[in-house]
Amino acid sequence: MTSSDFFSLLSAGSLFAIAITLVPTFLQFRRTLQKIEVLTEALSKNVDPLCQSLTEAANEIQYLSTSLNDKLEKTAAVIYTAQRSADMLLTTTAMLKETVRPFITQIGGFSAGVIAFSHFLNRSWKTPKKGE
């Protein structure tokens, strides 16, 4: 056996060993590719409904946000109107108080005068006069 025969035999044995190890690897690679294909098909079937559901949810959230914003603006307008009304009521009350205070003071003074006069008249009628 010559050295070239030996290397030829060694090369053939090496190729056979490589083929024996590569065939199961290629078979496993083929199975993996088939599973990836099945997974891709399942994802493509489920991704579209999921995207549609997410789009609908996003649209609903946007609608709710717009509705809430409108309600907040209306509430702010109502609060502003109530605040203006309260300020006007406070101003009107202060003006009425300042306007009515002198009249109440005059009525109080007049009432005190009437009470004092009636008290004086009442005492003078009850006290006996000199000579009677």
Image (cartoon, rainbow, N blue to C red):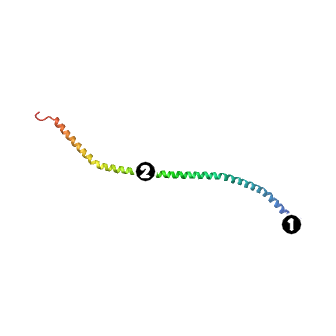
Q: Which mark is residue 44?
A: none
Q: Nearer the viewer, residue 101 or 57?
A: 57
In which image quadrant can residue 10 be found? bottom right
Q: Quadrant of the C terminus?
A: top left
Which residue shows up at 47% across the image and 52% down it? Answer: 73
Q: Quadrant of the N terminus?
A: bottom right
Mark 2 sits on what residue?
79
Q: Position of residue 127 (x, y in %)?
A: 16, 35
Residue positioned most to the top:
132
Image height check: is 116 above or below 27?
above
Mark 1 sits on what residue?
4
Which residue shows up at 76% across the image and 57% down it? Answer: 26
Amino acid type at circle 2 is: Ile
Q: Earlier in the sequence, mark 2 or mark 1?
A: 1
Q: Nearer the viewer, residue 24 or 84?
A: 84
Q: Position of residue 28 (x, y in %)?
A: 75, 55
Amino acid type at circle 1 is: Ser
Instruction: Give the total of numbered labels.
Output: 2
Which residue shows up at 39% across the image and 52% down it? Answer: 84
Residue positioned most to the right:
1
Which residue shows up at 38% across the image and 50% down it? Answer: 85
Q: Position of residue 45 (x, y in %)?
A: 67, 52
Number of residues whose C-alpha sits closer than 10 Å to that of mark 1, classed few (under 14), some (14–19) or many (20 or more): few
In which image quadrant can residue 112 be found? top left
Looking at the image, is mark 2 or mark 1 nearer the viewer? 2
Label 2: which secondary element: helix
**CA distance for labels 2 and 1:** 103 Å
Q: Nearer the viewer, residue 85 or 125?
A: 85
